[in-house]
Structure formats: structure tokens, C-alpha cells
Amino acid sequence: MRRALVIAVVALLCCCAGAAAEVVQQGDLRVKFEGEVSPMTLPREGAAPVTVSLGAQITTTDHKPPPQLRRIEIAINRNGRLDPDGLPVCRRDDIQPATTRDALQACRDSLVGEGEFSANVTIPEQSPFPSTGEVTVFNGVEDGRPVMFAHVYGTDPVPTSYTLPLRIGHAKGTFGTVLSASLPQVTSKVAYVTGLSLELKRTFRYRGHPHSYFSAGCPAPKGFPGAVFPFARASFSFAGGKTLSSTLTRHCRARGR
């Protein structure tokens, strides 16, 4: 038992010192996927509010434009929970079209995350140029089911706004919550997505008690100080049929007996 405990602690320290991202490559296409959950100290039993950070960078080794991103799917470890009960709902019509400022004015009470995107924009007879924009994420409902509405707003080459539904599904086994989104065709006519980052968090009061949209526990067995676990699995599908998948391994410290 003591030896197993030492091995667990060593694994935990090694994971802490490791890189924060996973890089996968197919041919010339390369995707760097990164993600974290904080705080790292979580209940052994039950769950506590957490912040979930996710990001991806899409590049090519030959420095040519990457193929157009068509679909993203991110699965979160089953010890993480997403609970929209009691949180106001934002309607897609309220934030599309809109600037980030207007979207926040309309749906601030439904805000669950913020971030950025980057893309290479191509215009006829010009070299591609980098463009960045803002992403705000709201709690919503579509077709009677809970979703996250990712509102994307950029200003280059012209002000552009679109809303991307992140559908919330469930899986059995290691991963419990699955977020998936298909990029609209309009975004792929002149823009090649090269990066995306999101920080998701929201606490509020529901029925007189503190409540969190995102919460998690630490899956450490009794007697162990923590655990190393598969935190998130991501799949990126591109035009032309390429799909790159990556799994991030993270660690947590257990609080409680």
C-alpha cells in the first residue's frame, strides 16, 4: 500500500511538471490542444465550482493555409459536471447579429464564458492576413435542449458576427459531457480558423443557495492524495476529410477523506 502511495505521488509530481498541451499531426497539418481546470484541489466526494480553460492552435508545417475547420467535438471527464438549472436563457435572436457589447447588453445574465479566436483571411489578389476576434458564450436552449451559444465577433476585413451553437451531449465511460459544434459554411469562404481559446465559468444563486454552471470532483481513491486522469478529449474535423484527435491528461488533489 505504501509503495502504491509513493508511485501515485511521483506520478502526480511528474504530471505537474509536464507540458500543458498535446500536439497531434497528420501530414502537414498540426493541432495543438490545451486545457486546464482550476482549482486543482477538489472534493473527493461531490463537486465544487471550477473554471475550465480550453484552447487550440491550428498550423501547417509547410506554412500553407490549413484546411478549413468544419467541426469540433470536446468531451470532458465524467467527474466534471455542467448544470444550467436556474441560469437565465439567452435566445439566439438576441445576439445575432450583434457586436460583443450589444450581445453582453442583451444576455449578460446568461454569460458562462469568454475567449478569443484567430483566423487567416484571404481576399482575392492579396496575401492572407491574420485576423482576431472576441468570443462570448451564453447559456441557451435550442430545439428544447440546453446549448451554449458562442457569439463570435470580428472587425477584419469588415465587422462580422455569427453565433455558433455548442450542443451539449452525454457519453458513457471515461468522458461524460460532450460539446460539439459545426462551423457554418459562411465562415469558410474567406477565413481559415487558426486558433480558439475559451475560459468557461459561472457561479450564481439558485433557490437561495450557491450554484455553479461548471463543477468537478477529484477521482482519487481513498488513501491517495490525488489522481492523474484523462481531462478532455478533442476531435477536429477539416475540409477534405482529415480528422485529428487528442486527449489531455491532468491531475487533481483530493480534499476530504
Image (cartoon, helix red, strand yellow):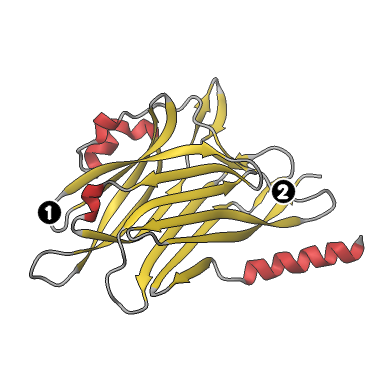
Residue 8 - label: none
Question: 228 above or below 13?
Answer: above
| Circles 1 and 2: CB atoms closer than 8 Å | no
Disc 1 target residue: 158
Q: Residue furthest top?
A: 207
Residue depicted at 43% across the width and 66% down the height:
31
Q: Is residue 192 found left or right of 246 in the rendered image? A: left
The image quadrant that residue 11 belongs to is bottom right
Crowding around mark 2 (Cα neighbors within 10 Å: few <14, some 14 to 19, many 20+) is many
Disc 2 target residue: 219
Q: Residue furthest front?
A: 241
- The quadrant the N terminus occupies is bottom right
Question: 19 above or below 119?
Answer: below
Residue depicted at 22% across the width and 37% down the height:
102
Spot occupied by residue 15 in the image (x, y as percentages of width and height): 66, 67
Residue depicted at 38% across the width and 26% down the height:
143
The image quadrant that residue 131 belongs to is bottom left
At label 1, the amino acid type is Val
Spot occupied by residue 45 in the image (x, y as percentages of width and height): 74, 40
At label 2, the amino acid type is Pro
Spot occupied by residue 183 in the image (x, y as percentages of width and height): 32, 48
| Nearest to N terminus: mark 1 or mark 2 | 1
Label 2 element class: loop
Q: CA distance from mark 1 to mark 2?
A: 47 Å
Spot occupied by residue 209 in the image (x, y as percentages of width and height): 57, 25
Q: Residue furthest right?
A: 1
Question: 49 above or below 208?
Answer: below
Residue depicted at 78% across the width and 56% down the height:
225
